[in-house]
Amino acid sequence: MLLLISPINTEEALESIKGGADIIDVKNPKEGSLGANFPWIIKSIKEITPDGMQVSATLGDVPYKPGTVSLAAAGAVVSGADYIKVGLYGTKNYDQAYEVMKNVVRAVNELNEDALVVASGYADAHRVGAVDPMDIPKVAAAAGADLAMVDTAVKDGKTLFDFMNTEDLTKFIDEIHDHGLKSALAGSVQKEQLPILYKLKCDVVGIRGAACSDGDRNSGTIKSSAVADLKEMVENF
């Protein structure tokens, strides 16, 4: 299971790198759960990330605007991202989500065939009117994406497990693997929940809050010691 840590700037990225994260996931919590950061921030973090570590970039909690989102994806690739993550926030159903993702995949592949595309839904989709998270594996597979993910849209202290139980998550992961894709899970995941995700055969776990001082994704900052603790735990499973 790979450990994805989500810094907002180069200082936090350095802490994530020092702590041994597998994937450095550039985001901007001020703009939402999967808020997009600026191209120059992605570029600067890519420049300081050592070989062997990959950089992910979130495109935001995106609207149902395939052209806009595809252009954002192209910008993330040009800025150096190895993973392009799309939060399907404004898509209401499978058809809308598929239309967004198939165009993102095309935009990314035309610029870098080695870049990986992540289709992300939300475990609490019902709270924001987004596409059902259980549709995300089918969306990702049909669109030609590489990973399917769930996160939480509303960051109010509730975690992934408040909205999807282990049976739901097992079904989600198994379907992804049946399609030959990788799975990613996030959503205010706590350290003590990592063993559960590992047992569910999750491929990538995404964390910000648990890697921050005081465990606060918004007011806290990522600390290498917290990242190292999480990494050690994952490696010892």
Image: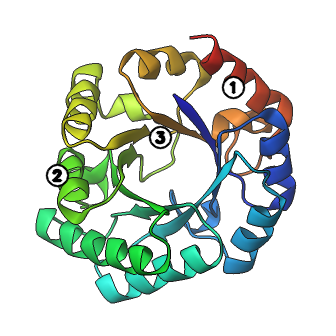
> Mark 2 — residue?
138
How far from the left and from the top, in percent, is residue 212?
75, 39
25 vs 64, left or right, is right
Q: Are marks 1 and 3 in contact (CB under 8 Å)?
A: no
- Of discs 2 and 3, which sits in the foreground? 2
Type of amino acid under label 2? Lys
157 vs 29, left or right, is left
161 vs 137, left or right, is right
Q: Nearer the viewer, residue 122 or 47?
A: 47
Quarter occupied by the C terminus: top right
> Mark 3 — residue?
187
* Residue at left offset 53%, top offset 63%: 58
Q: Which SS class for mark 3?
A: loop
Q: Nearer the viewer, residue 186 or 71?
A: 71
Q: Give the distance between the C-alpha atoms of the residues marked 2 and 3, in whole angstroms.
A: 21 Å
Q: Give the distance between the C-alpha atoms of the residues marked 1 and 3, in whole angstroms.
A: 18 Å
Q: Which SS class for mark 1?
A: helix
Q: Mark 1 or mark 3, which has the lower sequence index?
A: 3
How far from the left and from the top, in percent, is residue 95?
12, 69
How far from the left and from the top, in percent, is residue 2?
56, 33
* Residue at left offset 75%, top offset 32%: 227
Type of amino acid under label 1? Lys
User: Quick check: 216 above or below 139?
Assistant: above
How far from the left and from the top, in percent, is residue 10?
83, 60
